Every structure is written in C-alpha cells, then in structure tokens.
Amino acid sequence: MASGMSKTQLIRLLAEKNEMTRGQVVQFMDMLVATAYKEAKNSFTLPGLGKLVLVNRKARMGRNPATGEAIKIPAKKVVKFRVAKACKDAILGPSKKK
C-alpha cells in the first residue's frame, strides 16, 4: 500500500524548492499550524487548499451498534476542513456539468 509523504520528506522538499534551511521550514510550518489553530474559531483559509471551520452539530438520535438500542447524541462543536474547488480540480480534474 502506498503511503503519503512524511513530515520529514515534506520539510526536505520545501527547503530544497525554496532555498531555505530545514529549520526555517519547520519554524514556518509551526507558525502556520499555530495560526490555523488560533483562527479556526473564525474560519482559517489556506488559499487554493481549503478552509478550517468550526461547525455546531445538532443533537440527534443514534443507535448503539452492539445492542441496537436508541441513544441520544448530544449537540457539540466540531472542526471541519472544506477543500477548495481549485484543490479538487487540481487533484480530480475539472468537474463536468450536465
């Protein structure tokens, strides 16, 4: 099974392509991640990649898979990542409309 690029491989690639040291790339990535965490409450966008958003989920009824018993699932906040159209098109190819 093919695996994705590791953090070390990503850092090495970015350092080579941008003529930066690995330390500078790590520092930049850490700052980007910290900013994304801090700003996700108001939504954080990485242009061309996607957006982190905070979503309120409503309470709902569910089922215990082991017993089949109906259970109440409480409302909660979740973080979602919405992929940008440009990213989808770059990976999947342009979408065809009927």
Image (tube, grey):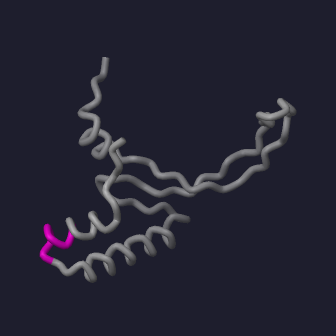
Q: Is residue 18 above or below residue 88?
A: below
User: 7 left or right of 65?
Assistant: left
**Is 26 left, or right, of 82 in this rendering?**
left
Q: Quadrant of the C terminus?
A: top left
Q: Is residue 44 left or right of residue 47?
A: right
Up-down: is 62 above or below 54? above
Percent of width and height locating residue 60 = 77, 39
Q: Residue at x 28, y 24 (%)?
A: 96
Q: Measuring from the top left, give residue 45's x and y in whole percent.
A: 39, 60
Considering every residue shown, the one lying at the far top of the view is 98
**Quadrant of the rendered image containing residue 70:** top right
Query: Residue 48 location in percent, x, y?
Result: 29, 53
**Magenta segment boundaries in residue numbering:** 14-19
Q: Residue furthest front?
A: 1
Q: Residue at x 24, y 42 (%)?
A: 90
Residue at horizontal 79 percent and vertical 49 percent from the top:
74
Residue 58 position in % (x across, y down): 72, 45
Main SS type for the magenta part?
Answer: helix
Give the quarter of the figure containing the N terminus: top left
Residue sitting at x 78%, y 45% = 73
Residue 91 vs 27, above or below: the answer is above
Please say whether residue 30 is one of the residues in the magenta stretch: no
Marks counted in the figure total 0
